[in-house]
Image (tube, rainbow, N blue to C red):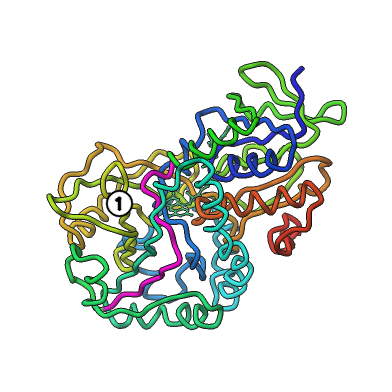
């Protein structure tokens, strides 16, 4: 049977990055996925590599806003009624973590990861020859009302305290950055510490190619075959069984298919989201991600067209898609930027793997010798893959971790 030091299961941004960091520390590493690298959640995201993210996306607490969401009048969210009973415990925990104190605590805990995320991407992107996919132009948030702008003040205050660059802009300031936007907003803010990726799936594939060039082994197979036998972890790949001294679960939204089997009780759910691509009108360009808070969408320039990504849909991971949110967002996107036809007949559906406190789990699995976890990156897994991969690789090889890993331990859930 083929043997490796480590089996990394799942080849999204998180798994590929984890595998590459472990390989760069001299370990023999097998990376296994049932598809090609970067073809699931890491393919269809908004391509924002954030150095400046602070408050996690939260559960609304204002009654008026809650009612709008409940009545499905807010484009930011949608839900599938039949899925709600099963989601109640998770939603309550998410609601609890969405208070001012909880959001500030998560923001502070995530800060060491966010602060290093771009630099870790740069190291991989340069080595992979993929730096052309990254555009260091920051991102812009637009506000359609003064009230909306005022509600984001706590975030700007925290940015000042933590030295995260943020420029407050009037509409003219926004148009200087993005001259093709229609000035249908009253204010904006510019967050310069971010890279924009024109091909998120392509970036993961470039990192996976680098992993293979550096001696890693990439296999296809079903991670649900994972078992522990004879003191080692074993999976069945298309090339036959492989065993590893250690195994790492990096299955993003599909991590829930495995961790329960190994006795782990974790409050895990998915926040679904969609994208569509729109053809820009002739001469129209966009240099960076633009987030419309009230519209609940983000626009990003990609090789497929202008990608409009939606907010959150609460539904079962495998429930059928519901195009409602994408359909709401398209006219709003056209109101903001001159855009033509939608390029696909059905929106792409993705699933953000999420814990209620919006932090990933990174570290050893409790009570399972040799099993490690790196998943649950929520809205920021594309950003955080390389930096959480680094942290886990440091923990697994006895290197001093660059930051205290305690906030990301699975044990925080008891
Ligand atoms: C609409 C949307 C917009 C987003 N925008 C951003 C953004 O701008 N910036 C950002 O940082 N993040 C963003 N995110 C979040 C980000 O995309 C995710 O957090 C991230 O992609 C998760 O990466 P992952 O590697 O954990 O999961 P995935 O990319 O889903 O990888 C998991 C892998 O596991 C494999 N797998 C699953 N089951 C099995 C099995 N049984 N056997 C073998 N392999 C299996 C899958 O094939 C897949 O390749 C967005 C998400 C969505 C949905």
Q: Quadrant of residue 369?
A: top right
Q: Nearer the viewer, residue 209 or 252?
A: 209
Left or right of 3, for residue 195? left
Q: Nearer the viewer, residue 334 or 206?
A: 206
**Which SS type dominates the magenta stretch?**
strand
Residue at 48% over, 83% down: 157
Residue at 57% over, 75% down: 104
Instruction: For the C terminus, give its image quadrant.
Output: bottom right
Residue at 62% over, 37% down: 257
| SS class, disc 1 | strand
Q: Position of residue 124 (x, y in %)?
A: 55, 46
Left or right of 101, for residue 363? right
Based on the picture, tell me whether residue 198 belongs to the magenta stretch. Answer: yes
Ligand 1 near label 1 (Cβ, under 8 Å)? no
Q: Position of residue 155 (x, y in %)?
A: 47, 77
Q: Position of residue 298 (x, y in %)?
A: 34, 58
Residue at 25% over, 50% down: 327
Based on the picture, tell me whether residue 136 belongs to the magenta stretch. Answer: no
Instruction: For the N terminus, give its image quadrant.
Output: top right
Identify the residue under disc 1. Answer: 301
Q: Which residues are magenta?
A: 187-201
């Amino acid at each position: 049977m083929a043997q490796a030091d480590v089996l990394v299961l799942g080849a999204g941004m998180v798994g590929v990055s984890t595998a590459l960091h472990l390989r760069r520390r001299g370990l023999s590493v097998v990376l296994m996925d049932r598809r090609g690298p970067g073809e699931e959640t890491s393919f269809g995201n908004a391509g924002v590599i954030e150095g400046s993210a602070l408050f996690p996306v939260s559960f609304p607490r204002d009654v008026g806003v809650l009612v709008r969401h409940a009545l499905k009048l807010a484009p930011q969210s949608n839900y599938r009624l039949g899925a709600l009973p099963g989601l109640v415990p998770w939603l309550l925990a998410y609601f609890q973590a969405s208070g001012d104190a909880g959001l500030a605590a998560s923001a502070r805990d995530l800060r060491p990861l966010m602060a290093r995320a771009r630099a870790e991407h740069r190291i991989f992107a340069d080595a992979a020859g993929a730096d052309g996919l990254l555009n260091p132009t920051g991102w812009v948030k637009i506000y359609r009302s003064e009230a909306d702008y005022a509600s984001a003040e706590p975030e700007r205050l925290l940015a000042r305290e933590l030295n995260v660059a943020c420029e407050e802009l009037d509409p003219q300031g926004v148009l200087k950055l993005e001259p093709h936007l229609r000035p249908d907003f009253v204010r904006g803010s510019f967050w310069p510490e971010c890279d924009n990726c024109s091909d998120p799936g392509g970036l993961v594939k470039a990192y996976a190619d680098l992993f293979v060039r550096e001696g890693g082994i990439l296999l296809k197979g079903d991670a649900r075959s994972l078992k522990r036998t004879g003191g080692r972890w074993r999976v069945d790949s298309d090339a036959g069984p492989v065993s590893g001294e250690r195994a790492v679960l990096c299955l993003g939204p599909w991590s829930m298919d495995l961790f329960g089997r190994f006795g782990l009780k974790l409050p895990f759910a998915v926040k679904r989201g969609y994208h569509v691509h729109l053809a820009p009108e002739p001469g129209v360009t966009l240099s960076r991600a633009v987030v419309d808070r009230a519209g609940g969408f983000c626009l990003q320039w990609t090789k497929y067209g202008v990608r409009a990504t939606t907010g959150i849909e609460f539904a079962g991971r495998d429930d059928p898609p519901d195009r409602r949110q994408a359909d709401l967002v398209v006219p709003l996107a056209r109101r903001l930027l001159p855009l033509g036809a939608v390029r696909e007949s059905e929106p792409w559906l993705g699933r953000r793997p999420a814990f209620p406190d919006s932090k990933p789990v990174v570290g050893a699995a409790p009570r399972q010798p040799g099993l490690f976890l790196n998943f649950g990156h929520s809205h920021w897994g594309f950003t955080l893959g390389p930096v959480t991969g680094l942290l886990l690789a440091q923990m697994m090889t006895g290197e001093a971790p660059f930051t205290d890993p305690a906030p990301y331990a699975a044990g925080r859930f008891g």
